[in-house]
């Protein structure tokens, strides 16, 4: 039976296991030889448990900055834009994530 493209989007409040679920699904599908591409975001906290930002992580292990709090970024960094308390790195996100969409449309995954 041919595989058809499926999409999975998981949402929910912080700390309920969304990332853990994605990681476990990825492992199970990979064990069965089913090609999977995708990404998740990972929260970053400092030693005091204070949120410092987020990384974007692809299922093949590549990582980039998605957002950092103002304390962790130079305000004049031209690669960022500000959203609330966060400086966002759209170039890093696009460099990691957009090629995956190209792979999907070409049938690579």
Image (spheres, rainbow, N blue to C red):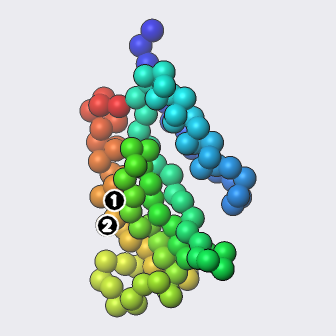
Verify CB contact (< 8 Å) between mark 1 and mark 2: yes
Q: Where, by quadrant of the figure, is residue 80 drawn?
A: bottom left
Q: Is residue 82 visible?
A: no
Decide: is 91 above or below 81: above
Decide: is 76 above or below 69: below
User: On the rendered image, what quadrant is the N terminus found in?
Assistant: top left
Residue 36 is situated, as x and y percent measured from the top left of the image, at 43, 33
In the image, taking residue 45 as reference, residue 68 lies left or right, namely: left
Residue 38 is situated, as x and y percent measured from the top left of the image, at 44, 43
Q: Where, by quadrant of the figure, is residue 79 drawn?
A: bottom left
| C-alpha span from label 1 to label 2 | 5 Å
Q: Give neighbour class at mark 2: few <14, some 14-19, many 20+ (Cα, 10 Å).
A: some
Q: Residue at x 35, y 31 (%)?
A: 109
Q: Residue at x 30, y 58 (%)?
A: 95
Residue 59 is situated, as x and y percent measured from the top left of the image, at 44, 44
- Number of disc labels: 2
Residue 22 is situated, as x and y percent measured from the top left of the image, at 57, 42
Q: Is residue 76 visible?
A: yes
Q: Identify residue for label 2.
A: 91
Q: Residue at x 29, y 42 (%)?
A: 102
Q: Identify residue for label 1.
A: 94
Residue at the farthest front position: 47
Decide: is 3 above or below 11: above
Mark 2 residue element: helix
Q: Residue at x 37, y 53 (%)?
A: 62
Residue at the farthest top position: 1
Mark 1 residue element: helix
């Amino acid at each position: 039976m041919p595989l058809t493209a499926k999409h999975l989007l998981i949402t929910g409040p912080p700390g309920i296991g969304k990332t853990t679920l994605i990681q476990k699904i990825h492992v199970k599908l990979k064990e069965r030889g089913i090609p999977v591409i995708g990404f998740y975001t990972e929260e970053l906290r400092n030693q005091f448990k204070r949120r410092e930002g987020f990384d974007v992580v692809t299922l093949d292990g590549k990582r980039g900055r998605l957002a950092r709090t103002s304390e962790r970024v130079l305000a004049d960094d031209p690669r960022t834009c500000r959203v609330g308390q966060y400086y966002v790195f759209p170039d890093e996100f696009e460099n990691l994530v957009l090629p995956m969409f190209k792979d999907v449309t070409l049938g690579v995954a």
